[in-house]
Image: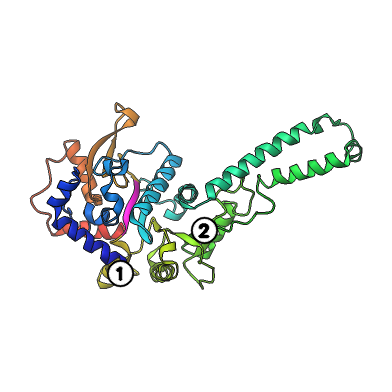
Amino acid sequence: NKHNIRASTITMILRYGLLLAAVAPLTVAFVAPQSPSSLSWKQQNKAFVSSPNFMSASPMEAAIGQPSELPDSLDDAAEIAASNTAAFAEASGPMSRCRVDFDTSAGDETFTALKSSTEFMQKYVTALSYSIVPGLQARRQDEMMRFAQAKSEFMNLGLQNVSDDDDDEGSEQQLSDEVKAKRDSLMQILNDGGRDPENKEWKGPKVRIYFPDEGSAALARRDWKIDAPPGDALVPPCVEFSSCGGIQYQDISKDMAILFFCPRASEADSVEEILMKAEETLVDNLAVTVFVNPVLVDMGITGFGLSGRMLRERLIDGLVNTYYLRTLQWGALTRRWPSAFSVWQEDENAEGGYRLIRAQDTLPSNPEVEDIYDMENGDKDGPSEGPGILNALGDFVNGMMRL
């Protein structure tokens, strides 16, 4: 299948690494995994390495191995995540899979991951849609121009000269039939946010979000104002809402991107079934599948044994972190694909309030992040000679809980 072909291609590239270096010199450091639960840069970016675009010089190539900067705001984080996802999808080809992790709770468990990341998700899916859906950006620009033109024409009708003291019937009598018709037409355009009255429904490719359950999907439909005019709706018209549970009755024939938002271990079977069906049905028309804040392995549901390991192999191990942001009590851990995972510490004397203390190719576990902080601040001289049974078990459990 597609994923096996990519793996074979990577093996070939590595086997003839010297020849590849002679053809196209690249300063890429391939670092071995630091723990069994970590994936090396080669594994994480196998789709990119095996793509034709890998050999061409580009800013994306220059970013490989470089530290990842922190975002300026939530909006900035969503834009960066969308841009990286779109770039990954273009580089790796159809049916690519990736993940986006966004956690700014800094350990505060007052709210669920779904609730605390809903605003990010809304902004992320909007930016991603405008980045990858053909014709969507042009449609929005046309709507904005039509709205601005209608507003200008409405003001030029001279309706503001009608006396505010006149009653509605008297005001109507002051207007000619032609002006009334023009006024009504312009008001309709303004009320519709500039949307073309003859082409209100979006008929192009769609981006589908799968929520954990129908209740959260219905809540998002309401809060994101999916049926409102373009200027009021918080997501573009190409976005469709579905849930992992229940009967899958929706038409997916036009889906070009699938996003699983905070899928839990209890939905693991449904997620896998939905994904397999989508890839078999859509084939090359499916550009990318994104898992946002997935928690697909749980001790009480899937377990950490054979079942959890097989699920991890089928769904999780192949996912590339196109964007990662997790705030800590003392800093943050972030990644912008294809740059490195970077650990930042708060520092009031540093530019932007943070200083970089580590950049590496693999996602560090929770204990590793704390060790990095301790070593940077003189609380620990360096890594121990051996992990020890308890430390190894802790790293394993933390690695699984991170999935």
Query: Residue 292 placed where, x, y %?
Result: 40, 55
Q: Earlier in the sequence, mark 1 or mark 2?
A: 1
Left or right of 60 on screen, residue 357? left
Amino acid carrying label 2: it is Pro
Left or right of 145 on screen, residue 379? left
In the image, 38 versus 184, the foreground residue is 184
322 in magenta: yes
Element under disc 1: loop
Residue, disc 2: 205
Element under disc 2: loop
Q: List the single residue furthest toward the top.
A: 349
The numbered dot on residue 67 is none
Location of residue 290 with respect to 83 vertically, above or below: below
Mark 2: few/some/many CA within 10 Å (<14, 14-19, 20+): many
Q: For the magenta stretch, what is the residue range?
A: 319-325
- The quarter holding residue 161 reads top right
Query: Residue 189 placed where, x, y %?
Result: 71, 45
Residue, disc 1: 1
Give the Cα separation between the discs numbered 1 and 2.
25 Å
Q: Residue at x 66, y 37 (%)?
A: 148
The quadrant of the image that shows the C terminus is: bottom left
In the image, 109 versus 36, the foreground residue is 36
Amino acid carrying label 1: it is Asn
Location of residue 366 with respect to 316 vertically, above or below: above
Query: Can residue 393 be seen here?
Result: no
Left or right of 40 on screen, residue 70? right
Helix, strand or loop: magenta stretch: strand
134 in magenta: no
Mark 1: few/some/many CA within 10 Å (<14, 14-19, 20+): few
Q: List the single residue furthest toward the left.
A: 385
